Image: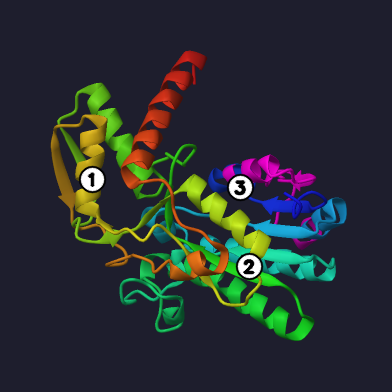
Amino acid sequence: MDFWAKKRVLVTGGSGFLGKFVVDILRRKGCAYISAPRSNEYDLTDNKQVIALFNDVKPHLVIHMAAQVGGIGANRAHPGSFFYNNLTMGVQCMEQARLAGVEKFVSIGTICCYPKYTPVPFHEENLWDGYPEETNAPYGLAKKMLLVQGNAYRQEYGFNSIFLMPVNLYGPHDNFNPETSHVIPALIKKCVEAVDCGSQEIVVWGTGKATREFLYVEDCARAIVKAAESYDKPDPVNIGSGMEISICDLVLLIAELTGFKGTIIWDSSKPDGQPRRCLDTTKASEEFGFTAETSFLVGMEKTILWYRDSIKTDKTSGK
């Protein structure tokens, strides 16, 4: 509580899926001043607007989460904009933070930074052992450059920048747009809609053989705030739950939880993405005491319940 009492904190992406939870935790911890501007207020790809943002907020600490994100389909459709926008936002925000004398810069990276064939579980030391999985490499490399920039600034300017790599997130307020969503919200939407309209089949991308690790969004927000409070080293840190599940088992679980009893059709012409994903989370536990608290089953039940409630709300309001 004392750490945040007199802090002015800038949270880029603070109105987004993860950002909402980070801002909520900061408020509960008594943060004196939180700025979480939307993209229509300050365009972080425009350096003049980034300069204006830092002049207006004058932050002591920055948590940089603003990003252009999406699932495999969105990454394949927009590799250029995913690379340019994510790189530009990060580079410009960190440079202005340095020039403004910001005390600490928390960069939120991604598991997509890792090489395609990283040994499981992923250890931070393996981060530079190969090229990322092709379908999301532009996004992963753009975010990875924040680690390079942060360490370069630490070496030359003594700038305190840390780099966190969350695994795939899920939870309430996720993006359920099928054009840009990640795997869990996409599957929930498909199953719920199939149940509601009586459809007897759903089509799922890939073979189902790939594996993923998932972290409940509120757990990730806690990790970010904990690291902002007490982690000051240059080394990147994994943020995850340490679990691993195949996409096939994930689909079967979501079908069961949503009540879908029809046929699952696998479209193997679509990519699986990275073959396996699972993090070693030892460093986060040792360095700033983070461990995931929400079980996958409980988190999924909460997410599905939130999505069903949001559908009812949209229907009531005429959306």
Q: Which residue sits at x=25%, y=48%?
A: 250
The residue identified by callout 3 is 22
Residue 60 drawn at (x, y percent): 80, 59
- The three-letter amino acid code for the residue at tag 1 is Val
Where is residue 302? Give x, y as percent. Answer: 39, 34
Q: Nearer the viewer, mark 2 or mark 3?
A: 2
Range of residues picked out in magenta: 21-49
- Residue 224 position in % (x across, y down): 58, 57
Query: Which numbered tag is attached to residue 179?
Result: none
Magenta region includes residue 274: no
Crowding at label 1, few (<14), some or many (≥20) Cα neighbours within 10 Å?
some
Q: Quadrant of residue 61?
A: bottom right
- Vertical side of 302 occupied by 1: above or below: below
Report if the CB atoms under discs 2 and 3 are less than 8 Å apart. no
Q: Residue at x 68, y 82 (%)?
A: 152
Judging depth in this view, the residue of 168 and 95 nearest the camera is 168
Q: Going by the image, does 34 lie left or right of 66?
A: right
Type of amino acid at the residue the image marks with label 3? Val
Q: Quadrant of residue 153?
A: bottom right
Counting residues from the start of the chain, the first of labels 1 and 2 encountered is 2
Q: Residues within 10 Å of mark 2 (few under 14, many from 20)?
A: many
Q: Which residue is labeled 1 in the image?
A: 251
* In this view, the mark in front (3 or 1): 3
Between the residue at mark 3 and the residue at mark 1, the CA separation in whole angstroms equals: 29 Å
Q: Amino acid at mark 2?
A: Tyr
Real-space Cα distance between discs 1 and 2?
36 Å
Q: Which residue is mark 2?
A: 231
In the rendered image, residue 264, in percent from the top left (x then y), is placed at 15, 42
Q: For mark 3, does the 10 Å Cα neighbourhood hold few (<14), some (14 to 19), or many (20 or more) residues?
A: many
SS for dot 2? loop
**Mark 2 → mark 3, Cα distance in angstroms:** 16 Å
